[in-house]
């Protein structure tokens, strides 16, 4: 296969929408493209290949995709050699309808066959016709694919794909399939490989991370995996997203509290505070259980920052139901929340439920929720004024940094911190200790001179312009049985 045109490598650009899983999939798409000889386009508007990695969760996802495809049509008509590919959850859902609605698209691939993209692009070019390939089950586990990481200091590590839950508002299980778990040894091999490349923070990723291990018969596997990450030398921070309250167990809380490099930050989706609405959503926990988990987490880790997801306006939600959600928000004291107005997603049970809530009512409740959350998050952030925090310096987190003369990064609890540098010259990936001087609802400022600055290998890599590019791990799909023994801590992985 060749990606050369008149002696020049063809260029690509990947445009990502949606969740962390999509962000990580896009890293794999980039790795595949570069493995096939493409190079990332310096000018995104002039790329030879544009890949859309789509999301199907929100109501306007379809409009957004087809609008963006429409904007590319003139460029495609002007340059027939340009190729457009559409992948991700919306591609899995719409299948061949995409090329019917946008016949200038060259390739459509699903969530289960990302690895086919380079070959499909070549076939489309050779055959001069669109290629559509949507598999209904996983072709290879994503870990087998090469990955072009976007960050020198932080990396996603998939521990599972798919979801076994049946939430009535969610289309993800239909698009991502049933849960498939990686072996602990395979996960740790990838973590070690990233750390060897200079990465200091990893986020364990799955649609429901704390049901990890169900496939190979160990319901305590996730807590064990967190503890095992604590043994990886050079790994400074471990995060995970997202757990499900129904599977959240005390051993995970203990692992978080007792493993020094596991951050005391927890994203625990609530969705609704009403037991009646939770039942209609098929969320198999209730308000009491949810708040009980929060209480246990705070007892073990008083400094824990807890974030959540909340849906407003689910079909049949009454004013009393919404008030229960506000009450849970007040009791849980979230550090932040991702809030959504319910939108109909065709193919989900909730789409045909009676008592769909008028948009005007949903909007009013949504604004009340935001006001309540802002009051709480601001109060919680003010408690940190005068406290010392450890900040992992980041890039792209502070939109006003250039104007204010600050840099930005994340504290161990996940909060965004904008900090003054004084005479120091920290780089993204370095660690700075500083003191909080000001709190806003969604960020913290530290305007004094930093207490310390530690240069790291990740900072060295950023300065050198090098991001980890890992070859795929030839692991195949996980199988059921006794988990493989973990490799010794010093054993490398041919990534």
Image (cartoon, rainbow, N blue to C red):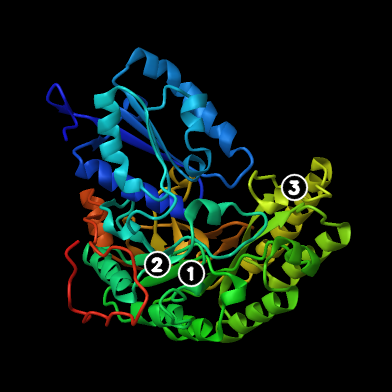
Numbered disc 2: secondary structure: loop
- Disc 2 crowd, CA 10 A, few/some/many (<14, 14-19, 20+): many
The spot of residue 105 in percent (x, y) is: 41, 27
Mark 2 and mark 1 in contact (Cβ < 8 Å)? yes
Residue at position x 27%, y 73% in the image: 234
Residue at mark 3: 352
Hey, which residue is sitting farthest left in the picture?
Answer: 7
What is the distance, in whole Å, between disc 3 and disc 2 at their CAs?
33 Å
The mark lying in front, picked from 3 and 1, is 3
Q: CA distance from mark 1 to mark 2?
A: 7 Å
Q: Circle 3 sits in a helix, a strand or a loop, which is it?
A: helix
Percent x, y for residue 26? 37, 47
Q: Residue at x 78, y 52 (%)?
A: 315
Q: CA distance from mark 3 to mark 1?
A: 29 Å
Left or right of 230 in this view: 11: left
Q: In the rendered image, which residue does mark 1 sit on?
A: 209
Image label count: 3
- Tell me, yes or no, if residue 165 can be seen here: yes
> Horizontal and vertical percent for residue 180?
42, 65
Q: Which residue is mark 2?
A: 159
């Amino acid at each position: 296969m060749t990606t050369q045109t008149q002696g020049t490598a063809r260029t690509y650009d990947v445009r990502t929408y949606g969740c962390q899983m999509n962000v990580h999939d896009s890293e794999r798409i980039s790795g595949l493209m570069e493995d096939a000889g493409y190079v990332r386009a310096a000018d995104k508007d002039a790329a030879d290949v544009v890949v859309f990695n789509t999301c199907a969760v929100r109501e306007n996802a379809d409009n957004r995709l087809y609008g963006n495809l429409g904007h590319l049509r003139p460029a495609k008509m002007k340059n027939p050699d340009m190729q457009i590919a559409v992948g991700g959850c919306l591609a899995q859902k719409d299948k061949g309808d995409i090329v019917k609605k946008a016949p200038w698209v060259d390739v459509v691939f699903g969530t289960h066959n990302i690895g086919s993209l380079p070959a499909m692009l070549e076939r489309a070019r050779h055959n001069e016709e669109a290629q559509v390939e949507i598999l209904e089950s996983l072709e290879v586990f994503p870990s087998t694919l090469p990955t072009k990481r976007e960050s020198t200091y932080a990396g996603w590590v998939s521990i599972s794909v798919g979801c076994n839950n049946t939430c009535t508002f969610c289309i993800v299980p239909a698009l991502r399939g049933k849960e498939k778990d990686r072996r602990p040894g395979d996960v740790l091999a990838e973590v070690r490989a990233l750390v060897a490349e200079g990465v200091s923070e990893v986020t364990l990723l799955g649609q429901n991370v704390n049901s990890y291990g169900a496939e190979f018969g160990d319901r305590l596997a996730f807590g064990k995996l967190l503890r095992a990450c604590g043994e990886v030398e050079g790994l400074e921070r471990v995060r995970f997203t997202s757990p499900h309250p129904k599977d959240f167990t005390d051993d995970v809380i203990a692992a978080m509290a007792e493993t020094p490099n596991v951050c005391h930050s927890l994203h625990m989706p609530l969705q609704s505070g009403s037991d009646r609405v939770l039942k209609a959503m098929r969320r198999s926990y209730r308000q009491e259980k949810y708040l009980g988990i929060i209480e246990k987490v705070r007892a073990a880790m008083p400094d824990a920052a807890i974030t959540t997801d909340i849906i407003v306006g689910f079909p049949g939600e009454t004013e009393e139901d919404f008030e229960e959600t506000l009450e849970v928000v007040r009791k849980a004291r979230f550090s932040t929340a991702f809030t959504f107005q319910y939108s109909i997603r065709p193919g989900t049970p909730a789409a045909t439920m009676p008592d769909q809530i008028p948009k005007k009512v949903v909007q009013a409740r949504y604004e009340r929720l935001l006001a309540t959350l802002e009051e709480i998050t601001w109060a919680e952030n003010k408690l940190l004024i005068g406290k010392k925090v450890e900040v992992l310096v980041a890039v792209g987190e502070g939109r006003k940094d250039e104007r204010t003369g600050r840099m930005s990064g994340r504290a161990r609890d996940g909060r965004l911190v904008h900090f003054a540098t004084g005479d120091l010259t920290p780089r993204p990936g370095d660690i700075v200790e500083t003191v909080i001087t000001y709190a806003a609802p969604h960020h913290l400022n530290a305007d004094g001179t930093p207490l310390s600055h530690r240069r790291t290998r990740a900072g060295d890599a950023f300065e050198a312009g090098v991001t980890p590019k890992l070859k795929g791990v030839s692991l195949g799909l996980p199988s059921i049985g006794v988990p493989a023994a973990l490799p010794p801590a010093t054993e490398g992985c041919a990534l």
